Amino acid sequence: MDGNTIILDNLQIGYTHNRQAMPVVGVIDAALHKGELVALVGRNGAGKSTLLRTLSAFQEPLAGSITYPDGKSHRRKAPELATQLAVVLTGNGGIHSLTVREVVAMGRVPYTGLIGHERRRDKEAVDAAMQAVGVGHLSERRIETLSDGERQKAMIAKALAQETPVIMLDEPTAFLDFGSRVQLFRLLQRLAHENGKSILVSTHDLELVLHLADRLWLIHDRKMYTGTVEALSDNGVLSSFIEADGIFYNSNDKRIEIR
């Protein structure tokens, strides 16, 4: 796939009502690239969550195709994709009364089964994932005792232990303070660049991704634009998306200004 991990070809996403297709975004042609942190941005209701659900096989596309790292299409159930992509949702997914290590070990279920026995390879993957995100010292803490930032790192470690080429995250910084948000985005950037992961993160933290994302998937006016921050600045897409009454985009400094 020549450096690509997921390819979207003539993809249409949306819903069906009374047998009538109701797309939320126009036709999408895009690709995730190995070793890149890609930010999925757009206003509320633009279709970000719909796209993530479609890519994760929780929702059928209206048309077009999705090709995954193994070269196979989207025409399979979500659990069958567990070795291809890992999904991190906001919060802890209702997980309680488990230690951090037990939560991270859940990422090995595609290989061990729900009641499977951990082999040495599984234990090594769990330990490596915890160390990679910096929660190794929290391994015996119960997940509900962690701060929001620590909990989100644990969930990312769970995804990392899953050993998939692609990791997708939906609003991972929603409940974090500014410092924790910066730290988390830098962690995702490092995992992409150093571990060769394709990381797609849906976010409203536009000011951070302007500086830290390798590429943007920007949904605006029912279209999805893809490219680097520089490219989307040069063609005016970012200014069109950001600027409103009293809000301006400084493309030279990659900064949003309020005047």
Image: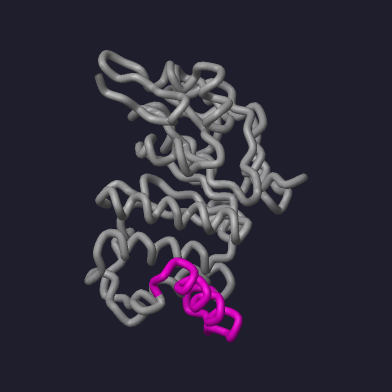
Position of residue 87 relative to residue 16, above or below, is: below
Position of residue 79 relative to residue 116, above or below, is: above
Residue at the extreme front: 252
Identity of the residue drawn at 26% across and 16% down: 246
Name the one closer to the observer, 64 or 42: 42
Q: Position of residue 93 (x, y in %)?
A: 33, 59
Query: Residue 153 lies in what quarter of the image?
Result: bottom left
Q: How many marks?
A: 0
Colour scheme shown? one colour
- Report the span colored magenta: 113-135
Identity of the residue drawn at 65% across and 44% down: 33
Quadrant, the C terminus: top left
Q: Is residue 134 magenta?
A: yes
Q: Position of residue 234 (x, y in %)?
A: 55, 20
Can residue 20 be seen in this snapshot? no
Position of residue 67 relative to residue 165, above or below, is: above
Identity of the residue drawn at 57% across and 32% down: 228
Identity of the residue drawn at 26% across and 75% down: 97
Query: Residue 18 lies in what quarter of the image?
Result: top left
Q: Position of residue 235 (x, y in %)?
A: 56, 17
